[in-house]
Amino acid sequence: MFSEIEKEYKKGLQQKRFIAYYWPCAALVAVITIIFALIFESLHWIIYGCAVVVFLVLVAVFFVWELHNAKHTFQSVRDSKGIISKLDAYFAADDEKRLNNLISDLASNNIRTKDDLKLALDYFQSRLPIVTRVGLVSWVLTAVIMLSSVIIVAYDEAIGTINIRHLIPAFGSAVVVALIILTPIIIAKIISVSISNSRSKVDTILVEDLAYIYVHFDQYQSQLNSSSFNRRHSNNRATI
């Protein structure tokens, strides 16, 4: 029951839509960019700059497509003027749609009382992942390993020392490859946080929404117990 609620809930999340669209495209761009950067070493910074532009274009295309669909779904988005106002209206309408979807899923699984909500809330809270932070030592070790790899490549056995002519290009290439890998990750993180109204983790959103419904139970009680609402909302949900 709870796993079905979670599965249906996450299908409609903004972050899930973004991740499903962005990562296949970004991964392909990153691989192609790394190949070109290694082949054309003298142009690696130009190639990296072009990759950053492509990553940002992918983000822009996502938002354009989302707004295009939202204008056909939400009256508030159609009535808004300006891109910022339209985005604000879209986020608000999507939040409302997400809550309505969750309420419909809860009711269809016979979770209708405040005690039932508390049980669901406790269950999903117990399944939240433990947050682990990368320590300074880990970052230092990673940097040392990368630097060691570059030094090994630049070591010239003929002269028995590091060849500076080899070190500088190798170090530059390593930095560019690292940036190509990190840039799409950073962009994805920033956009995921932004489109979810400062909610940084997909796993916590369900708990937050359940807690919101629990605290405002009187506001949503009639919807949880209304079979007509659930049938109507299920039909609307299938067309969005």
Image (spheres, rainbow, N blue to C red):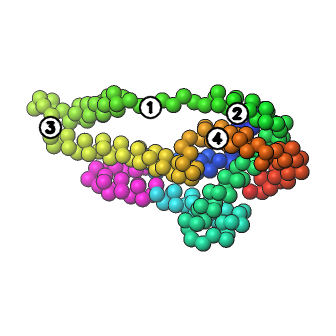
Q: Which residue is mark 3?
A: 163
**Amino acid beneath label 3:** Asn
Please report whichever mark, 1 or 3, sits nearer to the chain's N-terminal start: 1
Provide residue 57's location: percent of width, then percent of height.
Answer: 48, 60
Callout 1 crowding tier (Cα within 10 Å): few <14, some 14–19, many ≥20? few
Q: Which residue is mark 2?
A: 121
User: Can you name the residue that lies furthest to the left here?
Assistant: 159
Q: Is residue 37 magenta?
A: yes
Q: Give whichever of 192, 177 is nearer the camera.
A: 192
Provide residue 76's location: percent of width, then percent of height.
Answer: 68, 66
Secondary structure under tag 3 reads loop
| Disc 4/disc 2 C-alpha distance (Å) | 9 Å
Labels 4 and 2 touching (C-beta < 8 A)? no
Please report whichever mark, 4 or 2, sits nearer to the chain's N-terminal start: 2
| Disc 1/disc 4 C-alpha distance (Å) | 22 Å
What quarter of the picture does the C terminus occupy?
Answer: bottom right
**Amino acid beneath label 4:** Glu
**Amino acid beneath label 1:** Arg
**Amino acid beneath label 2:** Leu
Q: Which residue is mark 1?
A: 133
Residue 208: assigned label: 4
Secondary structure under tag 2 reads helix
Labels 1 and 4 touching (C-beta < 8 A)? no
Q: Give whichever of 152, 206 is nearer the camera.
A: 206
Magenta segment main secondary structure: helix
What quarter of the picture does the N terminus occupy?
Answer: top right
188 relative to 162 in the view: left or right: right
Residue at image point 59% right, 41% down: 202
Q: Give whichever of 42, 122 is nearer the camera.
A: 122
Provide residue 87's location: percent of width, then percent of height.
Answer: 59, 62
| Disc 2/disc 3 C-alpha distance (Å) | 61 Å
